[in-house]
Image: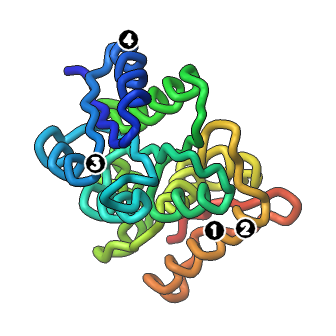
Amino acid sequence: MKPLVLMVDDDAELSGMVCELLEREGWAVHAVLTAGDGERALSQWRPDAVLLDVMLPDANGFELCRRWRAAHPGLGIVMLTARGDPMDRVLGLEIGADDYLPKPFEPRELVARVRALLRRQAPGRADAPQLRFDGLTIDLLKREVLVGSAAVSLTSVEYKLLTALARTPGQPLTREQLSDAVQNGSYKPLDRTVDVQVARLRRKLAEAAPGAEWIDTVRGEGYVFVPRG
């Protein structure tokens, strides 16, 4: 079955171009021009990925992203927007977007971003569906993190950081490597942004399991995941 990409953008000309572009890659594409139609299409078609514009005539794309991420944890979301402000990019990633591409974009870059996202979303991928440690479980299909039996609410960035670290337990990852894990492409968070996100991740894990620590700082390098127990 072909992967299905839903495009929600009020620019009909751009949507037509993107549909042709992605269909040539062998993907099915469904395009709508409003948030309302996007809501209905999401429920009806159950797409693998969504290309979501920030500035829609009937809704705010950031709010849609937040709501859709909560309702569909496994959905791939790429924000498309004419607003190239770095803080907008950070906000989009914070509220659950997997990627962020400012307009105008290179068609080849869009294809590469969507291909990478679909590869991560594919249910038949080779990596194990869960990463399990003493007291901590990361469900890669549901994009869910459990401490004991309780779910921990993480942003998309925090989830990606934790997953990147947990895939290589005991092996330090530099800030640059963690930055790459957060988002592919030309935009990279600053080192201090990675530090802030790791600090928030640590705090959430500590609140869920007081006294348990899974992430250590490696002076001069970055961070390392250390299984406990």
Which marked residue is nearer to the observer: mark 2 or mark 4? 4
Residue 91 falls left or right of residue 74: right
Which marked residue is nearer to the observer: mark 1 or mark 4? 4
Q: Which of marks 3 and 1 is nearer the N terminus?
A: 3
Q: What amino acid is found at the position of numbered circle 3 in the picture?
A: Thr
Q: Residue drawn 34% across and 75% down?
A: 148
Say above or below: 76 vs 58. Answer: above
Residue 38 falls left or right of residue 145: left
Residue where numbered disc 4 is placed: 24
- CA gap between label 1 and label 2 equals 5 Å
Q: What amino acid is found at the position of numbered circle 1 in the picture?
A: Gln
Residue 91 falls left or right of residue 42: right
Residue where numbered disc 2 is placed: 195
Which marked residue is nearer to the observer: mark 3 or mark 4? 3
Q: Which of marks 1 and 4 is nearer the N terminus?
A: 4
Q: Nearer the viewer, residue 190 or 181?
A: 190
- Give the image location of residue 114, x and y in percent: 45, 31
- Give the image location of residue 124, x and y in percent: 29, 30
Which marked residue is nearer to the observer: mark 3 or mark 1? 3
Residues at marks 3 and 2 touching, judged by CB atoms closer than 8 Å:
no
Q: Residue drawn 53% across and 57% down?
A: 93
Residue where numbered disc 3 is placed: 34
Residues at marks 1 and 2 touching, judged by CB atoms closer than 8 Å:
yes
- CA gap between label 1 and label 4 equals 38 Å
